[in-house]
Structures are given as structure tokens and as C-alpha cells.
Amino acid sequence: MRRYALRRGLTVIPVLVGVSALVFGFIHLIPGDPAVTMLGERATPEKVAEVRRQLGLDRPIHEQYLLYVGRLLRGDLGTSIVRGDPVLADLLRRFPATVELGTAAIALALLLGIPVGIVSAVWRNSVVDGLARVWALVGVSMPIFWLGLMLAWVFGVQLRWFPTGFRLGTDAALEPWTHFVLLDAALQGRWAIAGDALRHLVLPAVTLATIPLAVIARMTRASILEALSQDYIRTAEAKGLPQAAVVLRHALRNALLPVLTVIGLQVGHLLAGAILTETIFSWPGIGLWVYEAIEARDYAIVQGASLFIAVIFVTVNLATDLLYAAADPRVKYE
Amino acid sequence: MRLLSGALLVLVLLLGAAGPAPAQTFVFGGQGEPVQLDPAVITDGISAKITRQVYDQLFQFKGATTEVEPALAEKAEVSADGKVWTLQLRRNVKFHDGEPFDARAVVWNFERWMKTGHPQHANQLKAGQTFEYFEGQFEGFDDRSIIDKVEAVGSHTIRITLKRPQAPFLQNLAMFPFAIASPKAVEKWGTDFGKHPVGTGAFKFVAWKPNQEVVLEANPDYWGGRPKVQRAVVRNIKDNSQRVVALKAGEVHAIEGINPDDVKGIEADPNLYILRRPTNTTGYVAFNYKVKEFQDKRVRQAIAHAINKKAIVDALYGGSGLVATQFQPPPLWGYNKELKDFEYSPEKARELLRQAGLPGGLSEITWEDGKREPLVFWYMSRSRPYFPNPKEIGEAIAADLAKVGIKARLQTVEWAVYLDKRKNGQLPLYMLGWTGDNGDPDNFLCYFFCNPGVSREGFYASKPLADLLLRAATLTNQAERAKLYRQAEEMIHADVARIFIANNEPPLAFSKKVKGYVTNPVDDERFHTVEVQ
């Protein structure tokens, strides 16, 4: 196990080197001079030269890459071209909002996806199963952007149940201790604000949860169906255990392992989905931040955030693989 | 599904329904995150929307016009040679930090903008910021600037000496980048001043929550009268459709940046209304004069007659477009009302092509160096105020041209490459436009036509036009200048130098609870007149 962990851990290094090269390279790959893009119609040659110097684009490319990696190793993700703020500090300040949203979405996806998957596997080919499968298909293929707007329209504009955007109501004063609004509000005993924050969380979390929910439900269903056909299930049934115990104690435990992997992968999709969801709901996390940076051609932010997201993705997958190995004694890695 | 709706219902019951925003607060749905709130170094409209509430300039734009009226300066006198301006400043005005507004503060601001060695200028340069608008409007920094010196000649009087007369001088001073900041606050915060803005404006800065909102509070001592609301909040909503949703949900009172397709839905909503900002933007089709066919005026005329501008404006501008007859938009005082546009007439266009020796139309062009290639008509890949749907507009123009036998292949490329190709004079026939900065005709015409033959303008060269525009830029008498600009528009029209397609009057949408918002062509819109019921 320990050897596996070590080996699996080491594979992360080439991945990260590759990612850093890609992230670095894309500023050179995209068409057009980034300096001209940033400056727009009013660009003068002097201004363009100045911005190129600022971006370091006037140096030879290998030199640029080495400088870039050197800075990365010192934990320096550069400074925003538009605002001049350090990218890492901005990233860390905005990340809690994304974590809050992502956690809510994953929790929702698990709390609903797993039961739906179980129900539809146990009552296979029933009406419930049919509905769940159609829903899962729709969920996977749903354009998040459209769904978010529709939810905002129905629950925000027509019913006025939930706000259509932001983390808090206008002008809500809360000290940002941890930058997790719910946590801050609870710690400071501001329950009205906590309630407000929760109401703001509903629509974006439901939107972001849709795809992972559908994927998890489908995976759970398939995986339970497979488990139910195993010999040990027949044994359990044969010894007269009630169906609930057979499914929940024997089948589910084994069936959840592949689901675990899927959840790990979904974290990556969640971060991608967050870019759209946060933009639709003006949610001040890294998704919205990256979207604005792309529009403003703030390459320093796009590079820094891409790298950060890649690192998170790699880390979560590493963790899932290790968990998998730890959770399933049958799995042996040589 | 039942579970989901059940969970939602529980949450709703737990938390109660959304309440409306308190009436004493005006909530504006901004188009995204401001860059920063130091007006001297910003160039983006999103930030300027907020700095206009917090600061004043010496002059400002009057109501819904591009005319200049006194703001922090009460009176301006200019010497006979047009080079020395004496400005009387408003008395009893204080910055939000309690510091007095006086001649010293104004001189300090000018020196900060002008002198690259000024500590509060040098630190910005080091941080990668430049005073871009100062450089653009006043011809550079230090010795290069048209401003020779700025002196305090009394506690509330300043004298500005120019090297040459500058016709749009007061117009320039009325632009948002030349807002007067509290010297003490700038010195206190340095390059972080943009996060802690202090001016003399109708609203004081309270807080900026990143990617959420900027909160402002009424300045009860505002010289222009106490604002009608207690607070103003600018919420940053990046997505155009979502901004409409937030308005319909009652979460914001006003929005801008509306997709043309959404305008009808807003007009149909009994709780909302639309105001249009007087136009200050013109979209055009430009020729490359290194293309032999376009050197023939009859071909240019044919193209002008072939394009059905009205149909384009009606179909693709969401009711906000105007047919453009010339480069200056109608609100500018140099606008030529007499100018008669090319009528839409495919027959005339065909006839002109025949006269030009192209009876079969035009599908291949010849560059000056003899190279022949198929005609490509370039449209922009990015939506701009003057062409909100560049692709659709490009397609409409190409279809009009095809009707008279001019078969152009439509093409676009990434925005930066587009601008680059345009700058290098590589586009044979292309769409672009301009949005004015200060309401002065010079700002529209001179940038394009004062440098005959530059590759950036498709090598168009008219020395008489350039001379006329350069002369107009040095006069101080507005009536005389207006005459010259009207004449310039006639010259451009007569020569079909390029074809002006449309002006856009960008719509803003409001809740019916809101009254008193005044739209302005150069976006000089201040919230202190706004009421919320």
C-alpha cells in the first residue's frame, strides 16, 4: 500500500510539469498578439511594446519559460495584468466561495443521486426506474447555462423564492473572517445573514449539482445492478436477510467503490461547471474571476487559475485513488 | 424529482420569501467587476461608472448633451491667443476625507497626471499603470504635453498655460479621468488609492466587495445638492441575460448592457421601462485604397448605394439603432444636418459599376502590386457598441452587395489579429467603428483623417481634409469650428472615403420605482438625481 501510494504520488510530477508547460505555452499558441488584444482599438505601437515588455514577451521563449517555472517554485503566480494584484492572494480570497458552492453541489448530488440510483436499480425497469433514467440522461446533457437561467427565471423572477444571484443581499455587512460566508455568519452569530446566504446558495448549487447528480445516479444504478448479480448476494438472500439489508449492507458497500472514482472525477467537472454557474449567478468564486479574466485577456490570472485548477484536479484524483486502495482490501497493487 | 422539489419547499418555508430592496438604496446592475477606482489611471467604462459618483471634474457634461458646464470650476476665461486659461474654483467644497478643495489640490492633481517624476505618478508606472487618458488628450507627459504649466494664482484660482491653443480643452477636462482626487488620500494609499477612492462627488465610497458590489453613501454636503437616495450600490453582474433576470426579479433597479433581443421583453413588462442613451458611436465599412477597384470613386459609390442601412438598423439593433449619414453621431455639435445620404438603390449601384467598367460585378480584386485575389469582406469577431451583432450585420451587408453583383466572401479572425491586420492595411474591405470620448468632433474625425495615407486607415489620403481638421483643432470659437467640421463631413461624403452604417443608442432598463436617471452620450451619468420609491 505504501509503495503504491509513493508510486502513484510520483506520477503527479510529470503531469504537473506538463500542465505548467501547457499553461505557459497557451499564451503563445493563441492567435494574435496578447498585447494588442488587451489594448484594443486605441493601441499605439509604443503602448504595445510597453505591454509586451511587461508581459515578458520580448524575451526568448525558453528564457520566459524558465523564469516562469522559477517563479512558480517560489509560489509566485504573477500579478494581474489588469489590476496589478498578486494572482495567488486573489485566488485564495475567491476560492472559499467556489468551495462553498462546490461542496453544496456535491452534497446535493450525493444525497439525491445515490438514493435515486439505488431505487432505480432495485426496482429495475419499473416506472420509477424509467423516470430516473430519463432524468439522468436529461441531466447529463443539460446545458448548465440554460438551466441556470431557467431556474433563475422560475424561482427568482416568477415565484420570487430565491435570489437570482450573488452570495448575500445588497449591502449585507459581514466581517470576512474565513471568506466562507456561511461559516463566518455562524461564527459571528449572524443567523439572519446565514439564512440569507443559504437562500442565495440554493439556485447555483442546484444548477451546479445537476450533471454530477445525474452521473452519480447512473453510476450507482449500474454498479448496484452488477453487485446484485454476484454470488454473495444470492447467498445473503438465501439465508433469508430482508431485502433492505441485502441492498444496503451487502450490495451498496461494494457498489460504492466505482462511485467513489466517479465522484473524484466529478470534482474536476464541478470546477469547469463553476465557471458557467458562477457567471450566471454572479457568484464571486474563481469561476467568475476566470471568466472575467478571459474576457479582459488577463493572461496572468488565466494562467494562474488554470494551473491551480489542474493541481486541485490532480490532487483530488490522487486522493480518490488512494482512498480506493484503502477502502477495498481486494484491490492489490503491485 | 419529488425529493428535490420537497427539499426546495422545505428550504423556502425555513427561510421565507425574498423581500424587496429598501427604497432608500438605488441598486444599479453594473456590467462586471471594476478594475479600480482611481479615475486617473483607468480606461474602462465599468470602473468609470462608479468613479463618476465619487469624484467631480472641473467641468462636466450637461444633462443629456455633450455640452460642457462648470462643475468644480465655476468659471473659465481664456486669453486672446487661446493659450492661457484662468479657472475660478468653487468655494466651500470639501473632499470626503474632510480636506479642503482648493487651488493647491487642483495643481497637485495636474502635476500628478503630467509629471512622470511625481512620486504619485512614478509609483503607478512601477506598478504597471499608466495615465493613458492624460497622454491621449494632452499629447503626452512632461515636456511633450501640450500643457506647459499649471499654477495656483489665488486660494481658488488656477492658471493653465498651454503651448498651443487646444480647441477641445474644456471638453477634455470634463472627461472622467480628469476628476480631482484628494491629494492627502492619494498620498496615504499610494498605488492602493484605487481601492480607497476619495473625491468631492455626490457619493462617498463605503465598501468594495470583490465580484459582488461597490457600496456608496450619499454625501450630504454635495455642492450640487444632496442626493435623493441614502445609498447607491453597484452590483456586478457579468452576464447580459442574468442582468435582465435580476432586474425582473426586483433585485436591481437599473441595468445597462442589454442584448438587442432582450429589449422587447423589457418593453412588454409593465414594471419596467427603457431609456436610451443618446448615441455617441458610429459603425462603418472602410475601403483599402491599395485595392485598384476601390480607387475608382464610382465603385465606392456603388457600394454605398447597395447597402440597405435602414433594413440593417431595423432588424439588428433591437430598436436602438439609427441610420448613420456621416462619421459624427447626431448629438455632436459638428454634425452636418444638411448632409443627404446615399439612397438605397441597387439599380443605381449596378449602373455605377457598369460605368466603372465592371458590368459583371466584382468578385476579384487587384492590389496595387498587381496581385489578384477573391474579394473578402471582413467582419469583427467581437461585439462592439457600434456593431452589436457584427456577424449578422456583416452577412446583411454581404447579401446586399451580392444583389448588385459584388460577391465577397465573409471572413473574420480573432479580435487582436483583426486590429493588427487593420493597422497594417491588410484588409481590403472591412467593418469597424468608433465610440467618442469627450463629445468633441475632433475626437471622431482627427484620429482617422489627420494623417493622410496611414496604413491604419486603409491608406486613405486627403491632404485638404487633414489640413482642414488640423486647423479646426486649434480654433477656440465653437461656431467657426462647427462650420469646418460640417465641411469635413461633406468632403468625406463627396469622396465616399468610407461608408457610415449606423449609430447605436444603447438602451438602459429601469424599474418603474426609479425616477430621475439622466442618460448622457458620453456616459456622464450621476446618480444624485435618482429617486427610488
Image (cartoon, coloured by chain):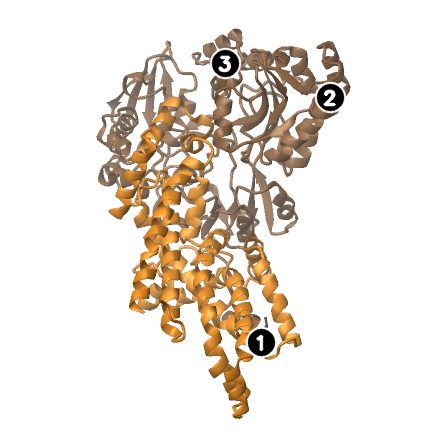
Chain colours: A orange, B brown
What residue is drawn where x is 65% and y is 15%? B300
The residue to which callout 1 is attached is A121
Task: Tell which subunit mark 2 falls on.
Answer: B
In which image quadrant can residue B395 be found? top right
Residue A291 spot, x, y in % from top left:
45, 46
Left or right of B107? Residue B528 is right
Who is closer to the viewer here, B366 or B237? Answer: B366
Amino acid under label 2? Gly
Give neighbour class at mark 2: few <14, some 14-19, many 20+ (Cα, 10 Å): many
Who is closer to the viewer here, B389 or B46? Answer: B389
Q: Residue furthest bottom?
A: A240
Residue B106 spot, x, y in % from top left:
29, 28
CA gap between label 2 and label 1 equals 65 Å
In which image quadrant can residue A225 be found? bottom right
Give neighbour class at mark 3: few <14, some 14-19, many 20+ (Cα, 10 Å): many
Amino acid under label 1? Ala
Above or below residue B315? Residue B79 is: above
